[in-house]
Amino acid sequence: MAHALTLTATEQRIAERLDPAASKQIAVSDAAGGVAFADVSQVMEFAKLMAISQIAVPKHLRGNPGACVAVCVQALEWRMSPYAVANKSYSVNDRLAYEAQLVQAVILQRAPIKGRIKTEYDGLGEKRTCRVWAELADSPGEVVAYLSPAFGTIQPKNSPLWKNDPDQQLHYYSVRAWCRRHFPDVLLGVYAKDEIDDTRRPGPEGARDVTPRGLSGKLDALGGTAPVPDDDPDDETGTDDVFGATGDAGDASQVGDAGGGAGEDSEPTIDPKSPDFAKGVADRRAGIKKCLKPEIKDDPQRFATWRAGFDSVEQEG
């Protein structure tokens, strides 16, 4: 494969699962979006191409065909280029978010209004507000409006533009809130980057693993070497699950059995009916990011089974 040496190990494994025949069926179009998909298999094939695009997509999408599928589907719904949407996306607190400019463009394209959205500011400093309004396309003369809270009360403000260009950010905020109030279907499940709080919150998703790491973890600490986190994007077990969802078909019993052979160096055998497998599934659905039970984590066989259950939830989603 051309330029194969420039790919990471994860990207190389994705590239090996590309289906040239399916890729050839994807039509290039001069209409909105630039490409035309006939079925979901073409979307998945295109997502694999995006996942190995390296500098053409942001870091959080590289080697991640599952997230690329989500971006492609969103781009199809919005009639935009998948690559344009990808490059306006971010990963914030384990969620996919989008640049405020893109969200604004989506609203202008999809909201059932006549003409453009009008904007009016009032007040100064922390008390400054923004009023936005627009005329309904199907009800001539009828206007829907929204008045923002005072600037100082708005949270979170995760974009630096809240300080550098406050009126622009207040405008973006007001238009999003206006849209969600009057046309909730337009932005259903879509959030701008500065809307998602990137600080850790209480509860399972913000939990910190305080489980003793055992001898290897202590040696890492003494040597100043940080252990590799379980949610490392280059983790091979998680990547295998993505391949199972977007490439070759496989069942959960094969998760983690990368070697395929017997012997001391072979991977543990995974039993999907095991309580540890079920525990992994339950933890993932509860938003827990790591195994918190020492009796499972310190046993390689049990931990491999737990991890297989944990990762299998991505295949279901």
Image (cartoon, rainbow, N blue to C red):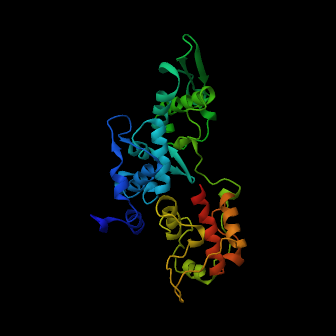
Report whether 228 appears left or right of 56. right
Q: Position of residue 213 (x, y in %)?
A: 63, 77
Image height of 105 relative to 289, above or below: above
| Number of dots carrying numbers | 0
Q: Position of residue 135 (x, y in %)?
A: 53, 16
Image height of 185 relative to 202, above or below: above
- Extreme residue in the top direction: 141
| Residue at 58 percent of width and 82 percent of height | 216
Residue 149 visible in image: no
Q: Position of residue 107 (x, y in %)?
A: 50, 30
| Residue at 55 percent of width and 10 percent of height | 141
Query: Quick one: 73 or 26, which is closer to the camera?
Result: 26
| Residue at 46 percent of width and 61 percent of height | 247
- Extreme residue in the left direction: 2
Image height of 183 relative to 291, above or below: above
- Extreme residue in the bottom direction: 264
Residue 140 visible in image: yes
Quadrant of the image for the C terminus? bottom right
Which image quadrant is residue 175 in?
top right
Query: Quick one: 34 or 51, which is closer to the camera?
Result: 34
Quadrant of the image for the N terminus? bottom left
